Amino acid sequence: MDMLQLRPMTIGEILGTSFKVYRKRWGTLIAVAGVLILPYAVLYPILMESPPSLTAAATVEELQQVLSAMAPWLIIRLLIIAIILSAISRTVVEAYVGVESPWRQHAAAAISRMVAIAVVSILFWAAVTAGSALFVVPGFYMLVALCACLPVLMVEGGGPLPAMSRSWRLTSGRRWGVFGVLLISTALVLFVEIAGGLLLGMVTVPLLGDFGFWVASEMAWLVAQPFIGVVLGVVYLDLRVRKEDLDTGYLSLQLSATAFDA
């Protein structure tokens, strides 16, 4: 693909660049997401017991039972998504320096950092949840301020707490712009997931029955979700260009220093 330029970008340019990266490397992105989510997608409908049904006037106890049944699977899925986004963010950075590693290497690199990714994910969602409990707005603030944690882990190395501190500094002064990018890209991904799931369901449901809904939703998710990882990678680089005058030479050296030995 044509070499991408490291330069400050507007919200529209960030989204446009994200589409360009997705279009040029869609095979790698979907392969990485697919191989990581596939075990979950297969095991969930087999092992997940039907949660207790809710009455019209659900009690607190009923809600707690439903949450208890679903919580372990939700936690596992959030961790898998974090690993996928981490792998994809490194794919984006490689696109900027003109490198294209096999999808297996991206997946393996993210898995090798799974413990750090898990810790960052726990701290990230704890901060967002705590912020959301305080009139919602602080939760969005924390989400934006810490959105660069995963790219930092995958490109710069280091531990979870330094990655969170680094993200906080990088997003400082640019959080409204980052919020706009995340809001638009999330809305686009949700639209594709819903519309794609409905269209695919027209094929899978007649063939597979109720299980077809699950297959259709997972297929739509697999196509749409990697775009969020691409956006996070592009946003991360845009922030570094603005704060540090980042160039491709130094970026290439960082990638080499944090490379995963397959």
Image: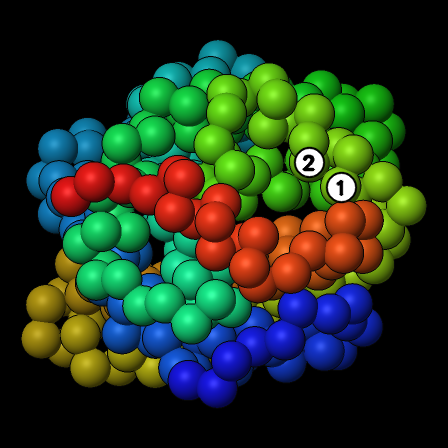
**Vertical placement of residue 77 versus 104, above or below:** above
Helix, strand or loop at disc 2?
helix
Res 22 seen here:
yes
x 66%, y 68%: residue? 6
Q: Position of residue 159 (x, y in %)?
A: 50, 21
The N terminus lies in quadrant:
bottom left
- Return the residue nearer the eye: 136 or 140: 140
The residue furthest right is 173
Q: Amino acid at mark 2?
A: Ser
Q: Position of residue 178 (x, y in %)?
A: 76, 55
Separation of marks 1 and 2 at Cα, in angstroms: 5 Å
Helix, strand or loop at disc 1?
helix
Q: Quickly name the residue at label 2.
A: 167
Q: Is residue 226 left or right of residue 5?
A: left
In this rendering, the count of numbered labels is 2
Q: Is residue 66 left or right of residue 48?
A: right
Q: Amino acid at mark 1?
A: Leu
Q: Quickly name the residue at label 1.
A: 170
Q: Position of residue 180 (x, y in %)?
A: 79, 61
Quarter-of-image position of residue 247:
bottom right
Q: Position of residue 86 (x, y in %)?
A: 43, 45
The C terminus lies in quadrant:
top left
Question: What label sits on residue 182 in the rendered view?
Answer: none
Q: How is the image coloured?
A: rainbow
